């Protein structure tokens, strides 16, 4: 019993430091790990080594994939490919189907772009369409933002999903395929269908976001933009499906199907197709990469800290004990994983922190119950998006960019994120009926 209390106290301290004290997350994780180790009776001499091992083990398998994913997404944004994808969908589907175009745009752009980058990048497009169509800004923009959020929470190579894949020993390609199965119906509900209920919410968007856009002739072509942005998703999904259909090809294709190789190949193609082939010099393209790495550094530090705490829980033996206790509860393990991530999300606000923190708690649960680790990644991802409120930076970005009251922000943004979390879990549970 004391071990469980110790874990609760450590996580509570972590929550207090980040949410109230605004302590940098890496420092908060390390302090919480030290406190947990002391409370759990670990020998003092072994505590630093356990934390360092946890940081190294988790980052070692993720740092290249996440960093290359960041520079790939930044190049998609800076080259204008993301904007070309959006304008092509809107013009192709026509004014009457703008909500559908915005839904597809958010999801497609959200696959290579990290959430905050995609949010800021797409805001001018949303407000320019508001001015042209006369539609309410919230109802028009919500499908796009739902697509960004779902891609961020469910799909590799986004940081939380990628860290969860490593923590529970899932397969990144299989997780991506299952994630698409879950994400698409969830997006339809939380995006265009939910947006139909928001037409009475009238915000006052800031005028700064209605500035003139880059002329279409300066953007890359539509085929180039779509093909390059979706290349890592297509490669991972295709190689995974091939190996599922032909298990004998798993070893010969192991190198090509590695997420590291897929991301490097995709970035190399993007450098040529969106950079060098369009007249940009290699130093100009690499300048974009340097900026992306600066932006991703805080997320890597969060993952590093979570790895240290996870290792303390593992070395102390409490993870195995906690996993056995959770497994004995009359609740499906996928629902338990979702609930753990939901609680952390409500307490800490950050979806990324919620996902990687939950990983250390649910890893032994996956081992004990033998539930599908790929589905557990998606269940935790759904929980990490639940109930966005005042401690989430995304909540305030949406409120201020769209000029909303707190009441309308809860009614629109918070409810959308909750729908994503609830229906994401529902579709994961449905999928689990067909997948062992």
Image: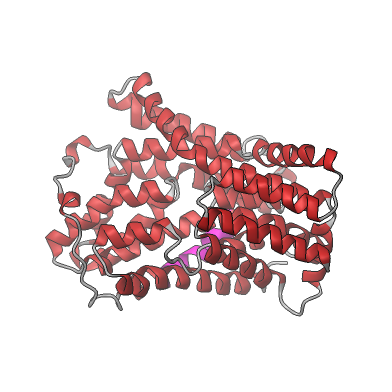
> Residues in magenta?
176-189
Left or right of 141 on screen, residue 207: left
Instruction: State whether residue 132 appears in this view.
Output: yes
Q: Reply above or below: 279 against 15.
A: above
Tell me the quadrant of the picture where the N terminus can be found: bottom right
Residue 228 belongs to magenta span = no
Instruction: State whether residue 382 appears in this view.
Output: no
The residue closer to the viewer here, 356 or 172, is: 356
Q: Residue at x 56, y 40 (%)?
A: 300
Q: Reply above or below: 15 against 287.
A: below
Residue 334 picture location, percent across and down = 67, 69
Q: Residue at x 65, y 72 (%)?
A: 335
Residue 79 picture location, percent across and down = 31, 35
Q: Quadrant of residue 257?
A: top right
Residue 432 picture location, percent across and down = 66, 70
The residue closer to the viewer here, 170 or 224, is: 170
The residue closer to the viewer here, 124 or 341, is: 341
Left or right of 367 on screen, residue 119: left
Left or right of 296 on screen, residue 65: right
The residue closer to the viewer here, 96 or 28, is: 28
Left or right of 2 on screen, residue 421: left
């Amino acid at each position: 019993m004391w071990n469980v209390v110790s874990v609760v106290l450590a996580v509570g301290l972590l929550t207090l430091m980040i949410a109230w004290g605004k302590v940098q997350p890496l420092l908060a994780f390390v302090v919480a790990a030290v406190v947990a180790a002391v409370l759990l009776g670990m020998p003092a001499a072994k505590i630093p080594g356990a934390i360092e091992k946890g940081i190294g083990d988790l980052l070692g398998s993720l740092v290249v994939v996440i960093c290359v994913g960041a520079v790939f997404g930044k190049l998609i944004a800076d080259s204008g490919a993301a904007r070309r994808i959006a304008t092509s969908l809107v013009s192709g589907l026509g004014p009457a189907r703008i909500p559908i175009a915005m839904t597809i745009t958010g999801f497609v752009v959200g696959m290579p772009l990290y959430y905050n980058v995609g949010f800021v990048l797409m805001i001018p497009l949303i407000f320019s369409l508001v001015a042209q169509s006369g539609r309410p800004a919230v109802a028009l923009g919500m499908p796009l933002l739902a697509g960004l959020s779902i891609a961020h929470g469910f799909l590799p190579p986004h940081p939380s999903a990628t860290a969860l894949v490593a923590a529970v020993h899932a397969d990144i390609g299989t997780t991506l395929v299952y994630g698409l199965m879950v994400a698409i119906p969830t997006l339809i509900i939380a995006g265009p269908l939910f947006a139909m209920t928001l037409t009475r919410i009238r915000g006052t968007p800031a005028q700064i976001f209605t500035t003139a856009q880059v002329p279409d002739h300066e953007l890359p072509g539509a085929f180039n933009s779509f093909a390059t942005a979706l290349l890592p998703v297509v490669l991972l999904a295709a190689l995974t499906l091939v190996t599922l259909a032909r298990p004998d090809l798993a070893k010969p294709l192991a190198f090509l199907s590695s997420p590291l190789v897929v991301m490097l190949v995709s970035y190399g193609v993007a450098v040529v197709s969106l950079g060098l082939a369009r007249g940009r010099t290699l130093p100009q393209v690499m300048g974009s990469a340097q900026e992306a790495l600066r932006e991703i550094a805080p997320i890597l530090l969060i993952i590093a800290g979570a790895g240290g705490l996870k290792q303390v829980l593992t070395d102390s033996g409490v993870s195995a004990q906690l996993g056995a206790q959770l497994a004995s509860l009359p609740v499906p393990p996928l629902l338990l994983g979702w609930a753990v991530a939901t609680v952390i999300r409500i307490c800490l606000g950050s979806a990324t922190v919620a996902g990687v923190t939950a990983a250390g708690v649910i890893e032994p649960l996956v081992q004990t119950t033998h539930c599908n680790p790929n589905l557990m990644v998606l269940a935790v991802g759904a929980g990490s998006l639940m109930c966005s409120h005042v401690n989430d930076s995304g909540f305030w970005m949406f409120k201020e960019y769209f000029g909303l009251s707190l009441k309308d922000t809860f009614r629109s943004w918070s409810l959308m994120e909750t729908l994503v979390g609830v229906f994401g879990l529902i579709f994961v549970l449905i999928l689990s009926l067909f997948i062992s």
